[in-house]
């Protein structure tokens, strides 16, 4: 057990180090660090346009074709965590992430060529979000090792539940993502990115919370989350 | 008698449609067939097979050739022989043709090609081809079919997207994908495409 944890911690370290070596920190003002100029959930620019547009799910299904080479059909993502599940995510969260990637607030070079401003309009983004939010999220997401679930639950209930909810359902009105049904490795990777200041568009409160947690804490919390029932959107 | 004007119009339309079909057939025979083969089943690896190709794709490529967005010296003499009004007829003609199977050149690459087509490469960020080009490589209204294409032609196009020499893809998306593909991945996936019926 100890060896396994040591190995996985070492892997995490390598992952985090290699990620930071490949990717310079986000250029957006402030990034994860609290900065007067950056408001993580500001309602402005094309995010506001997309949020105000009437999304059409049927159109969104067609527009999403360009995304499903990575996010897969029905937007279930990949259990290896390389691409997140998008099915059943809140419209507000989807629109925030898509527009933040385009604006460079969330640094994601892999995704950018497929969601850049010459590829999709704010209306397209609203359509994609309208399509994705209605898709079911079945309980076949990637899960953690299951080795420290009591610790994960304790951390989740102490530090995470006030925003992400008892069932990991998040809060659409607050841009808090739904986490139940998400792949373990994706959640773990993103928490580490946020802790290292690499994600760029996080809620500063989230940054403060994950900074207090070590790798084993994050693994346990992500593992616990990956096992929550996926029924609650 | 009251029907006569209507019948006359119908007759005129039928004659015009027949004339358009005859024009298309004449164009195909005089300008296209020598390279693209009988019914679009080209037998020469450098010339793309067009039989059963999505009409929207063929029409876009022909218009891009006519306007210079896509360039090809071999096509130039034929392009001088037709105009925009001929494009839709040619596209419909090739979409309606039946594709004949071709013999893949290298069976050893099929498994790697299929893996890339179905799953992409999560390390380098190559999306799975199937996401846009559809199961069995059949394409749809928005993305070209790739099934049964000559490996040589498909590899040339991927290399040209990769280098930017071909740049008439929608929103630079295919260039972004090809730029992430290794030469080995290109060699493998084109063999898999050729093997699709």
Image: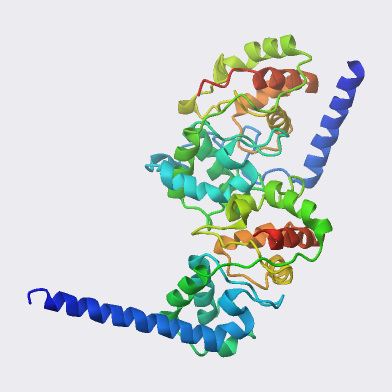
Q: Position of residue B72 (x, y in %)?
A: 63, 81
| Rendered view: A187 above or below B62 | above
Q: Position of residue B19 (x, y in %)?
A: 36, 84
Q: Position of residue B1 (x, y in %)?
A: 7, 77
Residue at the image point whose x is 50% and y is 33% from the top = A135
- Of all residues, the one furthest to the left in this rendering is B2
Residue A103 shows in this picture:
yes
Residue B21 is left or right of residue B49, and the answer is: left
**Nearest the eye: B162 or A141:** A141
Residue B95 is left or right of residue B106, and the answer is: left
Q: Position of residue B129 (x, y in %)?
A: 65, 53
**Nearest the eye: B18 or A40:** B18
Residue A176 is left or right of residue A21, and the answer is: left
Residue B72 shows in this picture:
no
**Nearest the eye: B187 or B95:** B95
Q: Quadrant of residue A44?
A: top left
Q: Quadrant of residue A149?
A: top right
| Rendered view: A167 above or below B75 | above
Residue at the image point whose x is 78% and y is 41% from the top = A19
Residue at the image point whose x is 58% and y is 90% from the top = B77
Residue A115 is left or right of residue B106, and the answer is: left
Residue at the image point whose x is 71% and y is 49% from the top = B120
| Rendered view: B69 above or below A160 | below
């Amino acid at each position: 057990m100890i060896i396994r944890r040591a190995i996985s911690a070492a892997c995490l370290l390598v992952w985090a180090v290699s990620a930071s070596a490949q990717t310079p920190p986000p250029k957006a003002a402030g990034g994860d660090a609290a900065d007067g100029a950056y408001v993580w959930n500001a309602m402005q620019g094309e995010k506001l346009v997309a949020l105000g547009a009437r999304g059409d799910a049927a159109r969104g299904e067609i527009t999403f074709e360009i995304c499903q080479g990575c996010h897969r059909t029905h937007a279930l993502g990949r259990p290896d965590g390389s691409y997140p599940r998008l099915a059943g995510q809140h419209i507000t969260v989807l629109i925030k992430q898509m527009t933040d990637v385009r604006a460079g607030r969330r640094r994601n070079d892999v995704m950018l060529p497929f969601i850049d401003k010459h590829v999709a309009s704010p209306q397209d983004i609203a359509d994609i979000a309208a399509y994705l939010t209605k898709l079911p999220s079945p309980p076949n997401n990637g899960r953690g090792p299951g080795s420290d679930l009591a610790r994960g639950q304790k951390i989740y209930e102490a530090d995470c539940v006030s925003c992400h909810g008892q069932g990991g359902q998040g809060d659409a009105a607050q841009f808090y993502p739904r986490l139940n049904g998400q792949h373990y490795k994706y959640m773990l990777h993103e928490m580490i990115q946020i802790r290292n200041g690499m994600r760029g568009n996080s809620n500063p409160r989230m940054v403060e919370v994950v900074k207090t947690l070590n790798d084993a804490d994050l693994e346990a919390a992500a593992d616990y989350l990956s096992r929550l029932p996926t029924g609650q959107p | 008698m009251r029907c006569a004007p209507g019948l006359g119009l119908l007759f005129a339309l039928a004659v015009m449609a027949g004339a358009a079909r005859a024009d298309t057939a004449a164009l195909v025979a005089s300008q296209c067939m020598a390279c693209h083969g009988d019914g679009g089943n080209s037998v020469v690896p450098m010339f793309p097979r067009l039989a059963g190709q999505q009409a929207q794709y063929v029409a876009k490529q022909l218009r891009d050739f006519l306007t210079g967005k896509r360039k090809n010296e071999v096509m130039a003499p034929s392009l001088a022989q037709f105009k925009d009004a001929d494009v839709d007829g040619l596209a419909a003609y090739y979409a309606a043709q039946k594709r004949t199977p071709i013999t893949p050149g290298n069976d050893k690459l099929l498994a790697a090609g299929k893996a890339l087509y179905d799953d992409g490469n999560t390390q380098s960020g190559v999306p799975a081809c199937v996401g846009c080009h559809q199961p069995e490589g059949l394409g749809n209204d928005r993305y070209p079919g790739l099934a049964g294409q000559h490996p040589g032609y498909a590899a040339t196009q991927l290399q040209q997207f990769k280098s930017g020499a071909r740049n008439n893809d929608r929103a630079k998306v295919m260039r972004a994908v090809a730029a992430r593909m290794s030469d080995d991945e290109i060699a493998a996936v084109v063999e898999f495409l050729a093997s699709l019926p």
